[in-house]
Amino acid sequence: MRFHKIPEETVRRLPIYLRGLAVSPEQGQTHISSESLAAFVGVNSWQIRKDFSYFGEFGTRGVGYNIERLAREIKRILRLDVIRKAALVGVGDLGSALLAYPGFGAYGLDISAAFDVDPAKIGTRVNGVQIEGIEGLDRLKDRDISLAIVAVPRAAAQATVDRLVAAGIKGILNFAPCKVDIPKRVKLITLDIAMELARLPYYIPRAGRMDEEQRADSARQLQL
Amino acid sequence: MRFHKIPEETVRRLPIYLRGLAVSPEQGQTHISSESLAAFVGVNSWQIRKDFSYFGEFGTRGVGYNIERLAREIKRILRLDVIRKAALVGVGDLGSALLAYPGFGAYGLDISAAFDVDPAKIGTRVNGVQIEGIEGLDRLKDRDISLAIVAVPRAAAQATVDRLVAAGIKGILNFAPCKVDIPKRVKLITLDIAMELARLPYYIPRAGRMDEEQRADSARQLQL
DNA sequence: CCATGTGAAGGTATTCACAGCC
DNA sequence: GGCTGTGAATACCTTCACATGG
């Protein structure tokens, strides 16, 4: 493996592979081939092999990948080999749903703190996590929390993120539908749910007319 | 504008521009330049101009883009020029949060039906929408609902999607963390929240060591 | 012989730089 | 003069085809 810049897209796919390994029907087997994993996660086998190749040689030719070893390697690459604690800011409908969501555990992620401005919520417990006031954000440094989820209204997003950055948070998952400025050393992923739904209709063919845009669609569909 | 295949990434950005136009501080002005819009939404001005250029010439040189006209054009391109009705399947924590989320309206999206298997939920109202039993999915055809949001457990996802496809749904936003097979004529967007959080730690620099992967990170950071 | 690992080819998207037009 | 629209250059990612090695 010579040195290569690692594509952003490869990093995006690594958690897919990890998830695939965890629930694959190959459970019970010790090894899995890139071909089987491909069929299960919906990514091409050569793409999988290329992705892994950026980080080392994890497989055995003629045999495949040792499932446990591969999972361990991916976790190491993603820095998920330690439990990662996350703070949730904004315990509204979405925030509460996230607190209740059991899917984070599979990645070693733990939402271990939650914050809100609403005095009525502060002190109550949601799914075993006690809601704290916003001023608690400034004391995150000592609690070994490196990640944060922002589920506050748009108007509060930038201020929230600024405060998280000041508190030493290293990565933020933002659900507020707006641009947020952040220093380069902190990684920000913004996930705008309404926007995702909003681009679905684009792919609905418009009945009847066959204009330029429509033709573009057809072209795209053909090669998919 | 000669004919060009439209990049997937361009389609992904269109809703960002629409959102930007709706809340930009240029409100009150009639026109906005690609430069101002760029600053506001966090995309380069040349990227914005290139994106629009795939669909036509919407601006005026020396002046900028007429805000109303541009918004109308983007809505038309995204097929958001009619109200789009969506069905929600799975009214658990996440599903309920989505029903309560006010952000869809800005795009002309309306979650007008909700379905769940739980008899205790059927018949109750969440945010003005009455929960129906799953068998109602088969009668979606007559209700002018073209989109669906899937917020069911992983094990139920494929069956749910199959049923939606059979009911003539054209686009699906899936929150279940698994691969889902679907005919090419239906557009599927899968959004795995835990997975998004799981790739954040990758970007946290590992203190001390400076191995091959770490160098790759540095290289990436520099050019961002 | 079988499945991995990887240069090289091909395709797609971003960035540039400037011509074109109001 | 100022801002759009766009071919050309560049960067990036995917796909291929096969050498490599258990």
Image: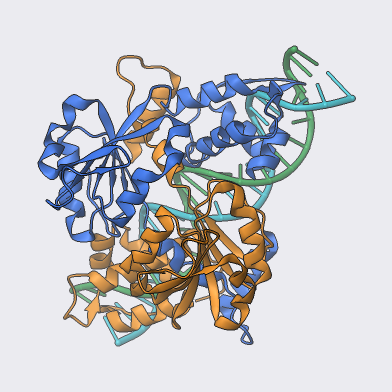
Chain colours: A orange, B blue, C green, D cyan
Q: In which quadrant will I find the C terminus of chain B?
A: bottom right
Where is residue A52? Give x, y as percent.
41, 71
User: Percent position (x, y) of residue B95?
Assistant: 30, 50
Q: Nearer the viewer, residue A51 or A94?
A: A94
For residue A56, say whether it is visible. Answer: no
Q: Is residue B138 above or below residue B120?
A: above
Q: Nearer the viewer, residue B100 or B48?
A: B100
Residue at 22 percent of width and 83 percent of height: A30
**Vertical side of B54 occupied by B124: above or below:** below
Q: How many marks?
A: 0
Residue at screen point 18% across, 74% down = A26
Q: Is residue D18 left or right of residue A176?
A: left
Tell which residue pokes out farthest to the front in this image.
A120
Q: Quadrant of residue B143?
A: top left
Query: As displayed, is residue B159 above or below residue A75?
Result: above
For residue B204, which quarter of the picture? bottom right
Q: Quadrant of the N terminus of chain B?
A: top right
